Amino acid sequence: MLMASHFTSSSQVWFLFLAIALGVKLSECANITIINYCKETVWPGITPKNNFSGDGFELKQGQSAVFTAPTGWSGRIWGRTGCDFDKNNNGTCQTGRCGTGLKCNEPGQPPASIAEFTLGETDFYDVSLVDGFNLPIVVKPVNGKGNCSSAGCDSDLRPNCPSELALKLNNKTIACRSACNVFDTDEYCCRGAYSSPVSCLPTNYSRIFKTACPVAYSFAFDDPTSVITCSSTDYVVSFCSSRVKLRTIDLCGKSPGLAHSGNLLHRTILFGVKSACAHLDYFTSTKFG
């Protein structure tokens, strides 16, 4: 179910800013704002953990959207690139495709940089490069309680991707594949005799990913340094956020720890769950050089 929510008075917007600045959680749901700072259009894919009937949409450069995750939601968010959809929203993508439509109906295909969430009384979240890398992606909690540090990878691995892992189109590297995806061996895929944390250890390839992206999963048993917890929080998932400086603004400004600019792409995705969640509709769309 898709919904659009617009605040029509300045007092309502000021209430949201004030509540967030004071650390007030506005609902039992988690509002996940997805922002595209890349120079290219990105088509985010969203799938819940228990099935692959999710959602997908287009975000042009500088656009953002709000996904309202119901209580207890677990799932994945990632960016698709190089997509071409017709007027009926049928088509395909160069990386991260999840079926043949704009909305996902299959698992996201590697290589893709993936933000993973398990939401509850305590949230668990991480960014995984286990299936490869196609875009810089960072998860940032908003005024949560607990560890609540950022997770993800702000670096672009594509220019320095080992040639044997590079996925190329017209001689341009469009993604960096995982060693498991390329070589399909038990050692690289952490299976068979290598299916435990004791036997599945970092490889030369996973170390390349980990060096570039120290707070992202680089292989299947990378949990101790890559899974982060937080509670009573909303989230920002940003693509290519190193291209802009996320500003921290006090109560006299707009919103602490968040970027703010022009026209918001209002979008709330609820996966058929009725909700009274408040929507953080102050994220915006602008152009970045």
Image: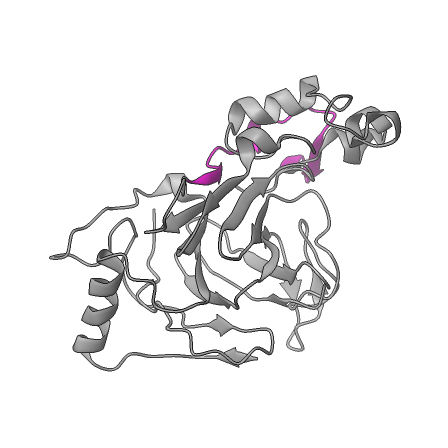
Residue 102 seen anywhere in this rendered image of the structure = yes
**Residue at the extreme left:** 252
Of residues 64 and 190, the one nearer the viewer is 190
Can you give x and y, in whole percent of width and height, for residue 284 in the image? 33, 63
The quarter of the picture where the N terminus appears is: bottom right
Q: Quadrant of residue 17?
A: bottom left
Residue 5 part of the magenta segment: no
Residue stretch in magenta: 150-173
Q: Nearer the viewer, residue 288 or 2?
A: 2
Residue at the far top: name it: 204
The percent position of residue 114, horizontal first and vertical second, equals: 60, 46
Position of residue 76 in the picture relative to residue 280 (left or right) = right
Of the pair 53 and 63, the residue shown nearer to us: 53
Residue at the extreme right? 192
Q: Report the side of 20 relative to 274 (left or right).
A: left
Quarter of the rendering containing residue 83: bottom right
Q: Where does the image place residue 78, in percent across and percent down from the top left?
A: 58, 52
Q: Residue at x 83, y 29 (%)?
A: 183
Which residue sits at x=70%, y=55%? Answer: 97
